[in-house]
Image (spheres, grey):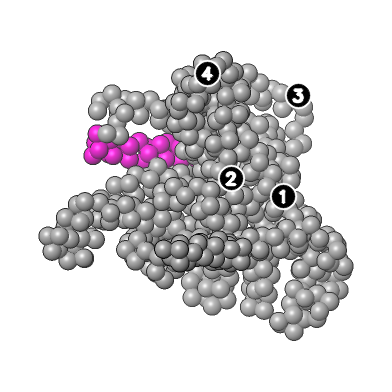
Amino acid sequence: MGAYVMHRVIQMLIAVFGISVIVFIITNMIGDPVNVLLPPETPYEQREIFREEMGFNRPLYIQYADFLSSAVRGDFGNSFRTERSALSLVMERMPATLLLTVAGTILATVIAIPMGILSAYKRYTIWDNLSTLFVVAGQAMPIFWLGLMLIIVFGVNLKWLPPSGYGEMGIDRLKHLILPTVVLGVFLAPVTERLVRSGMLDALTQDYVRTARAKGLSERVVLSRHAFRNTMIPVITVLGLQFGQLLGGAVITESVFAWPGVGLLAIDSIRNADFPVTQAAVVTLAIIISLVNLSVDILVGFIDPRLRQ
Amino acid sequence: MASVGSATQDSVNSAFSQQRLRQRTLRSVLQAAWKLRMSVIGGVILLILVFIAAAAPILSPYTPEEGRTVDRLQPPIWQGGSWSHPLGTDGIGRDYATRLMYGTRIALAVGLLATLLSGAIGIALGVMAGFFGGRIDAIISTLVNVMMTFPFILLALAVISVLGASFTNVVLVLGIGAWPIYTRVVKFEVERIKSLDYIHAGRVLGVSNLRLMARHIMPNLVNAIIVIGTVQVARLIISEAFLSFLGLGIQPPTPSWGYMLQESQAFMFSWSDIWLPTLPGLAIFITALSINFVGDGLRDLMDPHQRASL
């Protein structure tokens, strides 16, 4: 087990390192930081002096080494725009992203689990077909359009819910949360439903389910205690490994609803060529995704020793 | 005895008579079509979309990029509009139906080209990783992990803002971003096939690595790749629309559904303008939906064992 954990931790470090290299190269190509930092009318000589002072004239790999050694200490530099620490800007946005992701996951689970169980249990009936239709439609849905339509219908015209933003702490926040949650839920539910369905289909043919039925247990108990519990392991594993996809959905949702999370911050910083913030946002997201993947892997390896190889 | 024999003979004859056989074939085709009815419908819609994309200049008397301001915001036909602009006009008087039809071109072209590009990269890397194993596999698998870990859309946004938004760059970014899914599937398949006897036999006969990969392994992967590729076209069409929606994709005045949605946001404050944001989104949705239905059918036809796992 120790070797397995070590192996996975090293893999994770390599992945995070790889992403930091990619993001560093990309952000340094977006534009000349000197142009971003100095007003356009600055004379050439002053630009060059500034470039030298800031170290932007050094070779890229030296700048990267510098970036990396500060980054591991949590220092991504200051935002070009607000001159505040990039990492603390990212951390301020983290609760909003977390709230949205958790709410979206809960909604998706609430939709997907009953649907998946029903679909598998009543295979090839109208219920199965209906849920398949939901899945196929959900996967074809451009969620940013869904968000836009929800804003137009429920936010702007019916005025039932706030069209965008984060709101004040409390009931107001919950009201602001509803539409983005629906969008993220629709994004995530189809995948989850398919996982639950295929897991249940598999479980229902297993000997232990037949045994449970032979013992005379009620169908409810057979489904919930015997079949469904065994399905949850692969479902959680796959969902955990697809956490990056979920955050991708959150980025899209945040941008449509002006939800002030890390995704929106990342998009804004990319548009404004505010590299320290982009780097901090991307690397932080990468670390979080990798940590989730890692813990899922270790947990599953712990539960099922066959998977440690 | 003779009568029994001839009766059997008769029934055999009639069972295999041309007419019965034809009826059976027809029935089995119809049965298959009924089973795959959603895919058949999806396929028909897709063909219509391809036709619209190809024939847009013939189908419409207008150009998608020019409009007359006097004609601006004419309502569609169901809101009392005129047949000269059946789906109305947008904020600067361009015919909406025309823009939607030309948008089909952009969507299908980006989806197809980006899928071909990502498929080519992903398959090549997957075959290499699976065939050679060892260090090459380790490097490629790490790359796949890095790419799969990270939300693809953020990376695409960052790269687009470096390269600048244009049709070519959108295709490049989506193509270069979407390859890992092929690599993963192809690698596992190649590893499985590699250990089969006929590959060993090929090696013993002195068949070169390149030839083994191209002639003896690749043909076995075609079905799986076509199934993934189909669904990827739909995914990439949606991704392109999102990039364009953010203004980082296809640039105006070229009509792309995503950018049309972006423009329609200016008219979100009244019920009577709701068709403006509705139609481009529906176009994306219907296109992706029909492609996914076709993909489902292809999976049933070509790759039955994958269906159980999905």
**Residue carrying label 1:** B109
**Residue carrying label 3:** A45
Q: Which residues are magenta?
A: A276-305
C-alpha span from label 1 to label 2: 17 Å
> Label 1 amino acid?
Ala
Residue B231 percent across, percent down from the top left: 57, 50
Residue B277 percent across, percent down from the top left: 65, 67
Q: Residue at x 45, y 63 (%)?
A: B2
Q: Badge 1: few (under 14), some or many (20 or more) residues near its Cα, within 10 Å?
A: some
**Residue carrying label 4:** B203
Q: Chain of mark 3?
A: A
Discs 4 and 3 carry the same chain letter: no
Quarter holding the N terminus of chain A is top left
> Label 3 amino acid?
Glu
**Residue carrying label 2:** B226
Q: Badge 4: few (under 14), some or many (20 or more) residues near its Cα, within 10 Å?
A: few
- Are the residues at dot 4 and dot 1 in contact (C-beta closer than 8 Å)? no
Q: Is residue B72 above or below residue B123?
A: below
Residue A215 belongs to magenta span: no
Q: Chain of mark 4?
A: B
